[in-house]
Amino acid sequence: KAGVTQTPRYLIKTRGQQVTLSCSPISGHRSVSWYQQTPGQGLQFLFEYFSETQRNKGNFPGRFSGRQFSNSRSEMNVSTLELGDSALYLCASSTVAGGSYEQYFGPGTRLTVT
Amino acid sequence: GQNIDQPTEMTATEGAIVQINCTYQTSGFNGLFWYQQHAGEAPTFLSYNVLDGLEEKGRFSSFLSRSKGYSYLLLKELQMKDSASYLCAVRDKVDSGYALNFGKGTSLLVTP
């Protein structure tokens, strides 16, 4: 079974631009979550999607948005990029298996804002 | 909100046992995860505890006490490749969904 895939793996953008990141979950997983990881703040929850609905959102400004498609693939968008948005963006897909919750991360997209 | 605390750094010797502690405060506890993250890589799932007690998986074990807001990850027969950051994360029920909130991680260095 293929793992979580994210595209692109690396991205360089200029302040003020916008960016769209893509995530394909593990086959059969209907829940997708997004995280931002920076050296100073660690891993921070952005949002969670399940069956095309956003179930929860972390403490990030409205410039950060996302969506999930009917095939469970998800995208996140960051508008009006700021230097502080430079980070590793991780997507994770999850499911309940055998009564236990499992979550697996993709390799991440490293975004650099200049 | 919640607090998740774990030591910043630990050092242990190859072949030894190390215990990494995690304490948390949360209002909607729905499980605790441990992840391993090597530098420059994504976190790798190690364990999930939702009930009190010990879960064992090979060289790795994870313990949870919900009443104490406490968990630990036990690594036995340490190998050099176990040098990594270990992240404690609490799944919290929030509104109609869940949020996974992470501690800052414990950087483990295994020495020969």
Image (cartoon, grey):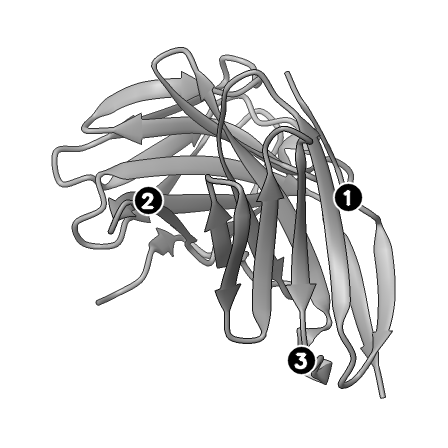
Packing grade of label 1 (10 A; few <14, some 14-19, many >=20) is many
Residue B66 place in picture, x, y as percent: 59, 32
Q: Amino acid at mark 2?
A: Ser
Q: Which mark is residue A70?
A: none
Nearest to N terminus: mark 1 or mark 3: 1
As drawn, A58 above or below B109: above
Q: Secondary structure at mark 3?
A: helix
Q: Is residue B67 visible?
A: yes
Q: What residue does disc 1 label?
A: B6
Write down the chain letter for disc 3: B
Q: Which mark is residue B81?
A: 3
Extreme left residue here? A70
Gap in angstroms between the C-alphas marked 1 and 3: 21 Å
Write down the chain letter for disc 1: B
Left or right, A48 with respect to A73, comes to right
Write down the chain letter for disc 2: A
As drawn, B90 above or below A53: below
User: Which residue is found at the position 49% from the left and 45% from the top?
Assistant: B49
Q: What residue does disc 2 label?
A: A94
User: Which residue is found at the position 77% from the left and 67% from the top?
Assistant: B18
Gap in angstroms between the C-alphas marked 3 and 2: 26 Å
Q: Amino acid at mark 1?
A: Gln
